[in-house]
Image (tube, rainbow, N blue to C red):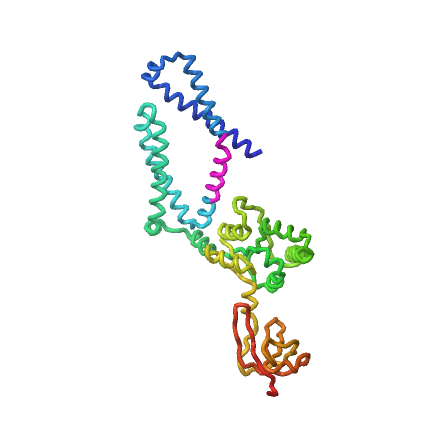
């Protein structure tokens, strides 16, 4: 419905534009004498010209709507990232530029035919110059114009604003995000984009049993976060139809909201870093909070299987950290005391090497 209204408005604009252009053209007396047109022919020519421009604008509506949408998104992104002070100074500069342009309105309007159009051009040019100069000279203007106390408080609040946290599909399915939120370590609103919910729904409807269970688990986790926890969970309804990949949509949304992405996805982590978008990785958090073990410390573990090398046994801590016990193969199934010999930190996590205390 809105698209049809925009299309009708653009067609009407084209009709008026075509009529105005034809009127300007037929004001040229030399052209009228050359074509030997009477009043009826001139009216017919104006109607034809108006209809042609209306048809052109009608056919260009999809392109114009697309350009308008992109321009709106670009303007929103710029305004959200622009400090309030710069917007205020830009508005003051724009106002001054328009005032100066309209001081010349009398002289410009006295020019035959082109006067009104020159006035529009003057308003656009001088308005842009005024806003641009004011923003570039904002530091000097700040020294001249005292900033009110309320504005300083607003700037301080903006600087200390808690950024929203945007969840991706992998971290919802993982489930640990609910426990982290329950501990109170995460602040600010939790944002769940509609396209992430849609991806979860597709996974939950998958014919593959494992995928279906993972998708349903993710939906249950979100339900639990919304109903049982004292945390703000918001569903972001806007989608980005011009972007195909969900990861790219998440990065775009984080840029618009000035938020952080919470994920377990290694590739999304790298893409976000390339776009200067902050990322909170649950796996990195899990590795960071594992207890620090130093060589020489003793612990009690249960050896559950043999290792890769001859005579080795493997045990695990409660947090999943693997312990390789040298000479532990003969103790498989037993709970023994071991002494840490070395600790290896890898990309996959921490690995502990130990030997039985009796050795």
Quadrant occupied by the C terminus? bottom right
Q: Between 22 and 91, which is closer to the camera in this rendering?
A: 22
Q: Is residue 316 above or below residue 43?
A: below
Number of numbered discs on residues: 0
Does the image show residue 227?
no
> Could you tell me residue 15's position as x and y percent?
46, 25
Provide the major secondary structure of the magenta segment. Answer: helix
Q: Position of residue 221 (x, y in %)?
A: 65, 58
Where, by quadrant of the figure, is residue 318 drawn?
A: bottom right
Which residue range is magenta in the image? 59-73
Which residue is drawn at the image coordinates 46% and 49% (left, top)?
Answer: 80
In this orientation, which residue lies closer to the viewer: 98 or 114?
114
> Residue 294 at x, y = what percent?
53, 79
Q: Is residue 121 above or below residue 132?
A: above
Left or right: 281 as drawn, with respect to 99: right
| 297 is higher (above) or lower (below) than 266 | below
Name the residue nearer the viewer: 247 or 231.
247
Q: Residue furthest front?
A: 310
Residue 65 sits inside the magenta stretch:
yes
* Left or right of 205 on screen, residue 355: left
| Quarter of the rendering occupied by the N terminus | top right
Residue 283 visible in image: yes
| Magenta-colored stretch includes residue 91 | no
Residue placed at 48% from the left, 26% from the top?
54
Where's residue 182, x and y in %? 62, 62
Among the 4 quarters of the image, the one containing residue 46: top left
Residue located at (34% from left, 38% from top): 97
Q: What's the residue at 43%, 18% (across, down)?
A: 45
């Amino acid at each position: 419905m809105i698209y049809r209204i925009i299309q009708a408005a653009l067609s009407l604009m084209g009709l008026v534009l075509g009529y105005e252009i034809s009127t300007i053209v037929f004001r040229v007396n030399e052209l009228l004498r050359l074509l030997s047109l009477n009043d009826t022919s001139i009216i017919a020519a104006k109607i034809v010209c108006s209809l042609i421009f209306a048809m052109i604008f009608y056919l260009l509506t999809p392109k114009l709507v697309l350009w308008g949408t992109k321009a709106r998104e670009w303007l929103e992104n710029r305004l959200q990232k622009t400090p309030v002070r710069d917007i205020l100074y830009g508005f003051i500069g724009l106002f001054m530029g328009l005032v100066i342009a309209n001081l010349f309105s009398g002289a410009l309007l006295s020019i035959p035919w082109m006067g009104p159009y020159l006035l529009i051009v003057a308003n656009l040019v001088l308005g842009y110059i005024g806003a641009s100069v004011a923003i570039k000279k904002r530091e000097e203007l700040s020294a001249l114009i005292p900033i009110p106390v309320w504005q300083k408080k607003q700037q301080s609040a903006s600087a200390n604003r808690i950024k929203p946290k945007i969840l991706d599909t992998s971290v919802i399915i993982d489930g640990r995000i609910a426990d982290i939120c329950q501990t109170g370590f995460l602040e600010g609103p939790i944002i769940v984009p509609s396209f992430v919910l849609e991806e979860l729904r597709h996974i939950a409807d998958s014919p593959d049993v494992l995928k279906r269970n993972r998708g349903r688990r993710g939906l249950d986790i979100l339900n639990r976060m919304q109903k049982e926890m004292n945390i703000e969970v918001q569903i972001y309804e806007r989608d980005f139809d011009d972007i195909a990949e969900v990861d790219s949509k998440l990065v775009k949304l984080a840029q618009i909201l000035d938020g952080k992405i919470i994920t377990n996805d290694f590739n999304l982590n790298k893409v976000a870093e390339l776009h200067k978008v902050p990322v909170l990785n649950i796996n990195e958090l899990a590795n960071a909070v594992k207890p620090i073990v130093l060589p020489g410390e003793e612990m009690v573990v249960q050896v559950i299987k043999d290792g890769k090398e001859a005579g080795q046994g493997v045990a695990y801590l409660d947090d999943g950290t693997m312990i390789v016990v040298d000479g532990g193969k003969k103790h498989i199934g037993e709970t023994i005391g071991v002494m840490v010999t070395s600790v290896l930190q890898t990309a996959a996590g921490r690995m502990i090497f130990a030997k039985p205390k009796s050795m």
